[in-house]
Image (cartoon, rainbow, N blue to C red):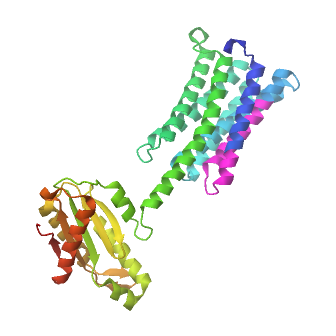
Amino acid sequence: MLGELDLTTVILMQKCSYIVGLLSFIYLKLSNRGLRGPVALAAGFAAMTIGSTLAGYGEWGIMSPAFWQLGSVVFGIIGYALIWLGLKVLSDGRPVGRRTVVVLCLAALLAIVVALQVAENNAYRAALFNGCAALAYLAGAGGLFARWRKERLLSRLALGAITGISGLISLSVVKSIFFPDYAIINLVNAFFFIIMLNFAIALFVMMLVAERSERKLLVLANTDPLTGVKNRRFFFQAMPAAPDPADAAMLLDIDHFKSINDRFGHAVGDSVLQEVAKRIGGSIRGADVLARYGGEEFIIFLPGAGGQKASMIGERIRNAVAVNDVDCGGLRVGVTISIGVATTGEMRCDLQTLAEMADRALYRAKSEGRNCVREALAA
């Protein structure tokens, strides 16, 4: 089938792929007002649409060669620069710095100056066009892969792979132009594959945005909005329903929290909750899971800690909270916490029962003077 395609048909298909991408990115921007990447991508695909239109007019003989040859490659250079910019913004999740924009503009300007010199030479013009495409797509793929550890989304990997393949195909075209004896793919087939990949880029950009939104909603559903720690719903859904014998749970309660709210107001009470959550989070191990249990109570799951280790961690938390007053906008509030610790031991109870055991230990800590750590008594 590929052998039946002519360059004019491929250019028309290429323009269609850019139009589809352009419309997709416009839709993304309209439906996600705070999203920045699609703006540059839409502008890039718009420039590519204009460039492919000029190339089509040239192939059909309805435009002077001097105009379409230079115009198509200039719009191509601008388009690929904007596509790289859009991929970078989309990948990083933040706008690029002024220095990056200046360097990009200078590089595009240099490429345009080169285009002025080689526009009439079909081989050089094609090499410059595809060289810019290779740089844009390979750099975009590199950025998508580089931030994989910070954002483990399958759509990010897929988009990186697609843009990387597009860049490699464009690079193979440059090689074929300068070394025709070692050509891997002809120009028409290369354009055809890049057209298919253009559709895929538009698709997976939309999938990346959708997957990010879904991940964000999931995080919001599992996070306490005031303190930023996990919430009770997440704790009982994500932690093991049947903890191991060495696993421990810790229930923590801010002492006399109601009197803090009554004396200083709820705004100060909120600041106390936020600071206590921060100090607790800074005192636990990396594998421990902290969640807000409700009101002024927090719960921690400590895998493999055992009773003795869990009590030591509890003392560290208690000291971290009590050692310094909480600064609430110039008002300093002394805060202490009471802590109950429980392990399943040989009972092999479920998570809910383990939390209830820690709650009974917490009640004992409060009844024995507060600002202390108590371990659940053996049954």
Percent across and percent down for residue 100 are 56, 47
Q: Nearer the viewer, residue 2 or 219?
A: 219
Q: Nearer the viewer, residue 29 or 376?
A: 376
User: Where are the magenta residues, as a range?
Assistant: 25-53
Mainly helix, strand or loop, the magenta region? helix
Q: Nearer the viewer, residue 269 or 75?
A: 269
Residue 218, visible in the rendered structure = yes
Q: Count the numbered circles shown.
A: 0
Up-down relation of residue 212 to residue 320 (above or below): above
Q: Is 45 in the magenta? A: yes
**Looking at the image, which residue sits at the far top?**
181
In the rendered image, which quarter contains the N terminus?
top right
Percent across and percent down for residue 78 are 69, 38
Q: Which residue sits at x=72%, y=24%? A: 118
Q: Which residue sits at x=47%, y=55%? A: 218
Q: Which residue sits at x=78%, y=27%? A: 55
Q: Is residue 268 left or right of residue 120?
A: left
Q: Quadrant of residue 319?
A: bottom left
Up-down relation of residue 251 to residue 201 (above or below): below
Up-down relation of residue 93 to residue 54 (above or below): below
Q: Quadrant of residue 370?
A: bottom left
Q: Which residue sits at x=63%, y=38%? A: 202
Q: Is residue 276 left or right of residue 211?
A: left
